[in-house]
Image (cartoon, rainbow, N blue to C red):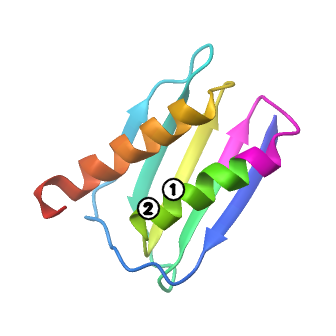
Amino acid sequence: METLNFRFDSGQRKLKPAPELVGVVSSGNLEVLIEAAPLNGACAIEIKTAARGFGAIWEAVMTDFQQRWQLADTRISINDMGATPAVVSLRLDQAVEAMLGDAK
């Protein structure tokens, strides 16, 4: 397993306090836990992945995600079993949309 950590400062969108879990960890998929956290306006992302050596791809996907959503005071935990970047983006978007509800 490889663990990757990313932090994006100066987000503008805060989420509701209740955590949200989407996806399942199984062959070729991942789960995403997203929760509000006091991070001085930052979004912190921790990824545990079975696929080693893809840090640059993860960084690109996480940067694109944060540019789309501009999250603040948010902690995201990802458990990955080899999901494609498209599936990662889908699961992240699902989690944020569930957290935003009608506030979007």
In the picture of the structure, the residue carrying the numbered disc 1 is 65
Q: Is residue 59 left or right of residue 70?
A: right
Residue at horizontal 50%, vertical 41%? Answer: 89
Q: Residue furthest right?
A: 53
Residue at horizontal 73%, vertical 35%? Answer: 49
| Front-most of residues 86 and 77 | 86
Q: Within the image, what quadrant is residue 78 found in?
A: top right
List x then y, in percent, for residue 8: 60, 73
Label 1 crowd (10 A; few <14 / some 14-19 / many >=20): some
**Mark 1 residue element:** helix
In the picture of the structure, the residue carrying the numbered disc 2 is 68
Residue at horizontal 86%, vertical 35%? Answer: 52
User: Is residue 20 something that shows in the picture?
Assistant: no
Q: Within the image, what quadrant is residue 95 found in?
A: top left
Please tell me whether residue 54 belongs to the stretch shown in magenta.
yes
> Is mark 2 in CB contact (under 8 Å) with mark 1?
yes
Residue at horizontal 52%, vertical 30%? Answer: 87
- What amino acid does circle 2 point to? Arg
User: Is residue 10 something that shows in the picture?
Assistant: yes
11 lies above or below 94: below
List x then y, in percent, for residue 37: 44, 70
Please tell me whether residue 13 belongs to the stretch shown in magenta.
no
**Mark 2 residue element:** helix
79 lies above or below 68: above
Q: Quadrant of the N terminus?
A: top right
Numbered label attached to residue 8: none
| Front-most of residues 36 and 68 | 68
Q: CA distance from mark 2 to mark 1?
A: 5 Å
User: In this picture, which residue range is highlighted in magenta?
Assistant: 47-57
